[in-house]
Amino acid sequence: MDLNLLIGLDALLEQRSVQNAAVQLHLTPPAVSRILSRLRTATGDELLVRSGRQMIPTARALEMQSDVRDLVARAEQILSPHRSLDLAQLQRTFVVRCHESLAPTVASGVVQAITSAAPQVQLRLLGEAPSDDQDLAQGLVELDIGAAPPNSASLRVRLIASDPMMLVTSRNSALDVERPTPDAITSVPHIAISRRGRDRGPLDDRLAEVGLTRRIIAIVPTTSAALAILTTTTSATVVPERLTHSLPAGLIARPLPFTLQSAPITLSWHRRHDSDPAHAWLRDIVSATLSAEPID
């Protein structure tokens, strides 16, 4: 069988869309439709059937998906030339999506490390998407730096750090004590941070265990917006510990009276970049910068 058919099948089964598979393969939708037609003839199966705006894989397609993925990955590994990475000559633009709270560290530390080693490389930083999307799968984003790994079998995820959660409030508030109690926490209004607009989180669950509820006066999508509100109101919010190192004037960080799940910091990328030495170098740069570990 033509290797291009396997590559096309792999993309179709991952994207479940002729249009999105075409973007991933850098082909036109009619070209991908022709690949799907040839695959149907070769396998004697529809493989993907339309259901509204989506294409649903058949039982045969689901059965072969894992094998197809392994075959394509193996072929790419065999056919990829072994080449050394010449950073001084590398010319490339990396598109990286980053959680807003991590952007200052990435923009300073990562850019400095990149420009000193590979002066012809450009880093394009994008803000976090409002919802989970297919940008990594479609090749529109090469690396995602965030707090929650996307749920996809085609993506690789590396945990690089994990931060405990801290309480942030204004100085001289009821929480300006060495260790605030649950009752003190609920005595002041709160700012919730959620890019999806959710008004409940792990802190609310822990407070509910002791019969308490906090009053949320605002829900904002970013940490910077929450901290800005805290500078003008007597309120509180909860953020990862690393974000408390340079708080705006008048704000303080205090430990919580109970343990919340730590905030993970992860790198996510599509498996097509596994054998890309330049991408592996970028991943190591970002990992070392965010975990404060030296780069070998």
Image: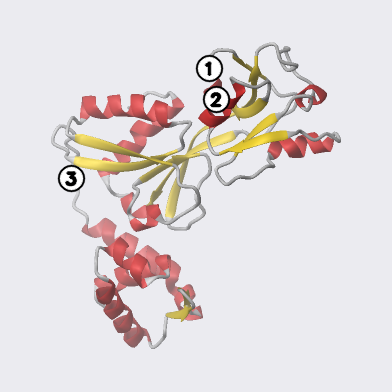
- The mark lying in front, picked from 3 and 2, is 2
Circle 1 residue: 248
Residue at image location 43% in from the left, 23% down from the top:
292
Q: Amino acid at mark 3?
A: Arg
Tell me the number on the disc at residue 83: 3
Circle 2 residue: 228
Q: Amino acid at mark 2?
A: Ala
Residue at image location 54% in from the left, 13% down from the top:
249
Q: Earlier in the sequence, mark 1 or mark 3?
A: 3
x then y, percent, for residue 139: 32, 54
Q: Which quadrant of the rendered structure holds the N terminus?
A: bottom left
Q: Is residue 182 above or below residue 221?
A: above
**CA–CA distance in space, label 3 to label 2:** 49 Å
| Marks 1 & 2, CB-CB < 8 Å contact | yes
**CA–CA distance in space, label 1 to label 3:** 47 Å
Q: Earlier in the sequence, mark 1 or mark 2?
A: 2
Residue 113, image quadrant: top left
The residue closer to the viewer here, 51 or 118, is 51
Q: Is residue 147 above or below residue 296?
A: below
Residue 178, image quadrant: top right
Q: Earlier in the sequence, mark 3 or mark 2?
A: 3
Residue at image location 21% in from the left, 36% down from the top:
121
x then y, percent, for residue 190: 69, 30
Indicate the secondary structure of the residue bearing disc 2. Answer: helix
Q: Which quadrant of the rendered structure holds the C terminus?
A: top left
- The mark lying in front, picked from 1 and 2, is 2
Q: Amino acid at mark 1?
A: Pro
Residue found farthest to the right: 211
Indicate the secondary structure of the residue bearing disc 1. Answer: loop
